[in-house]
């Protein structure tokens, strides 16, 4: 053990006794010092005895009117007074600093990347001195090592957790890059996507039963019989799906509200005008006991912003 480590160990064992010693020196009476420490006088007297045993020296002479420091006590007080006083003052100032609130959100990758990320500057500006921690996963209801104040997740309305607020329903269309659209004028109807040669891009997770639409579900929602699996390239994050779509690699399912900014600036286009709407949607759930009142503000802000989006 280094000398500083050894000294920390010794100091930690005697810190409370030293605090008592310094207060007795300041007040000149055990009773007054004990009152400041909110302990009994016998307890403080025992702390002084413990310190004297550690040092092997008597620090005070007890008198009827109070206590007087011995030469050893005077020497110890003189040695500690400046640094100990500064330490107590600085620690008090640190405690008095305004605390920064911290709101933890658990969201899926798609919502974080395509809805929340671009709005974070506005959210931070409106909240002021508040830290925002975003935990992303494919299943926001089961975040790893997190205790979220707000959870934003996909579910059908019948299975949504009680107390959750619906942000927006699933409204899904087929999207692709302008380059892919120009290259494939033959793709006019949803039935054309059953051709095995059409590269379909899909979001899935091998170990997770997903609530969102698959290509088969989307086609069936438009009345097209799908009697076999639809060939597709599967990704485990929606950001990868969209990068592939924007790069002209195929056709993806586009969730309106999430992809609206990309449609507006022309990075992607609707392959055809067909939409499928379901009772699945994004929900926001506030924790029963959020760690900060600011969580209520964030929840209200998200609800208001999604209402404007649709």
Image (cartoon, rainbow, N blue to C red):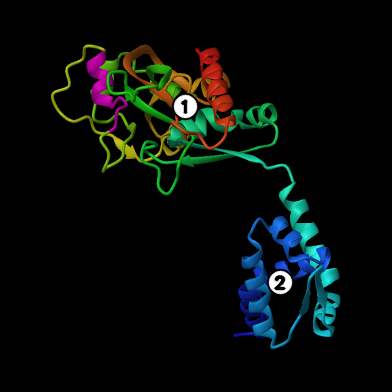
- Residue visible at 65% across and 74% down in the picture: 14
Give the mark nearer the N terminus: 2 vs 1.
Answer: 2
Relative height, residue 74 to residue 301 (above, below): below
Q: What residue would you read off at disc 1?
A: 177
Q: Which residue is mark 2?
A: 18
Position of 47 with respect to 260 (left or right) is: right
Separation (CA) of disc 2 from disc 1: 72 Å
Q: Mark 2 near mark 1, Cβ–Cβ under 8 Å?
A: no
Residue 186 image offset from top left, x and y in percent? 34, 18
**Residue 236 in magenta stretch:** no
The image quadrant of residue 217 is top left
Using the image as rendered, state which of residue 148 and residue 44 is in the foreground: 44
- For residue 310, above or below residue 35: above
Q: Would you say residue 211 sits in the magenta stretch?
A: yes
Range covered by the magenta-colored residues? 210-221
Mark 1 element type: loop
Snapshot quadrant of residue 6? bottom right
SS type, badge 2: helix
């Amino acid at each position: 053990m280094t000398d500083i480590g050894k000294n920390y160990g010794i100091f930690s064992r005697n810190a409370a006794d030293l605090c008592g010693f310094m207060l007795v020196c300041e007040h000149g009476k055990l009773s007054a010092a004990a009152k400041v420490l909110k302990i009994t006088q016998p307890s403080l007297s025992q702390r002084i005895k413990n310190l004297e045993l550690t040092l092997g020296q008597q620090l005070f002479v007890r008198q009827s009117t109070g206590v007087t420091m011995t030469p050893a006590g005077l020497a110890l007080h003189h040695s500690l007074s400046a640094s100990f006083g500064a330490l107590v003052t600085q620690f008090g100032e640190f405690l008095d600093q305004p605390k920064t609130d911290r709101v933890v959100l658990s969201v899926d990758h798609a919502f974080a990347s395509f809805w929340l990320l671009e709005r974070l500057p506005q959210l931070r500006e409106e909240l002021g001195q508040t830290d925002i921690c975003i935990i992303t996963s494919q299943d926001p209801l089961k975040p790893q090592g997190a205790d979220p104040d707000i959870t934003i997740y996909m579910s059908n309305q019948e299975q949504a957790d009680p107390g959750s607020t619906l942000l927006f329903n699933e409204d899904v269309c087929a999207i692709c890059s302008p380059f892919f659209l120009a290259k494939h004028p033959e793709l006019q109807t949803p039935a054309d996507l059953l051709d095995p040669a059409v590269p379909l891009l899909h979001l899935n997770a091998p170990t997770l039963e997903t609530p969102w639409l698959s290509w088969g579900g989307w086609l069936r929602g438009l009345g097209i019989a799908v009697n076999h699996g639809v060939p597709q390239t599967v990704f485990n994050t929606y950001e990868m799906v969209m990068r592939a779509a924007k790069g002209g690699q195929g056709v993806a399912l586009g969730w309106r509200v999430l992809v609206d900014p990309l449609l507006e600036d022309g990075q992607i286009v609707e392959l055809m005008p067909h939409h499928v709407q379901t009772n699945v949607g994004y929900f926001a759930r506030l924790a029963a006991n959020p760690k900060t009142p600011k969580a209520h503000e964030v929840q209200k802000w998200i609800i208001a912003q999604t209402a404007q989006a649709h």
